[in-house]
Amino acid sequence: MTRWFEDIVIDEPFPLGSHTFSAEEIIRFGRAYDPQYFHTDPDLAKHSHFGGLIASGWHTVSVGHRKMVDALFAEEERLRGLGQEPGVSGPSPGVNSMDFKAPVRPGDTVTYQLVVTDKRRSNSIPGWGLLFNRLTATNQHGDLVYEADLVGFSKLRDYRMPWRLTLLLALTRVPVLGKLIRRGS
């Protein structure tokens, strides 16, 4: 999130936008990244248990991830426009679960949403918190097509490093002491 850890509200929906999947786009992505016949060949796909061409799950994920990044940048701009300093997002330590619930077909418009379901301060990285997120994607009929539980870092706004940690960090920058400290850990 581009909000400070302290400002993130649990269970607040964060809309990411929608995308309409075309047959051409599904085939192009399938050929490049997931070349299975039900993603690349409409004639063969008719006879599959899917009953026609479907988007690769990774295509659905990739579009959703792009929507998420774009929405977070837009939120950063919105906050700056209000005269506020946006928070700092960090990397993601992983995906806890990912489920493809229903196929995405040509012509489907998929709407993505992110919700922070929980948060806590990081036990291992001072000054950062962990966000536990649910990303969902629904088609134009309201059917859930994809959901994932993601984890991400968010910087704490008012974090002050404890003096002992500050001293240790400073000592690691002294050449001889730094080598001794690094050897000991």
Image: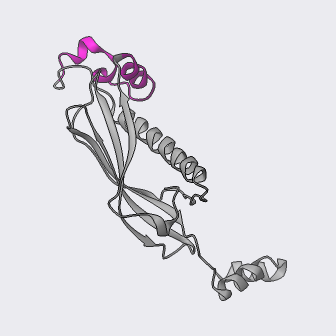
Dominant SS type (magenta): helix
Residue drawn 45% across and 66% down? 130
How many marks the image carries: the answer is 0
**Does 154 lie within the magenta span?**
no
Determine whether, in the image, residue 140 is placed left or right of residue 74. left
- Location of residue 46 by image quarter: top left
Residue that extends furthest to the front in the rendered view of this protein:
82
Of residues 86 and 98, which is closer to you in this image?
86
Residue drawn 83% across and 81% down? 176
* Above or below, comparing residue 69 to residue 3 in the picture: above
Of residues 137 and 102, which is closer to you in this image?
137
Quarter of the figure that contains the C terminus: bottom right
Provide residue 110's location: percent of width, then percent of height.
Answer: 31, 33
Determine whether, in the image, residue 1 is placed left or right of residue 58. right
* Above or below, comparing residue 147 to residue 30 in the picture: below
Instruction: Give the magenta range.
Output: 24-48
Residue drawn 32% across and 60% down? 11
Residue that extends furthest to the right in the rendered view of this protein:
175
Provide residue 123's location: percent of width, then percent of height.
Answer: 48, 76
* Above or below, comparing residue 99 to residue 108 in the picture: below
Residue that extends furthest to the bottom in the rendered view of this protein:
164
**Does 47 lie within the magenta span?**
yes
Residue drawn 37% across and 30% down? 19
- Location of residue 22 by image quarter: top left
The chosen color scheme is: one colour
Provide residue 125's location: percent of width, then percent of height.
Answer: 55, 72
Provide residue 78's location: percent of width, then percent of height.
Answer: 54, 48
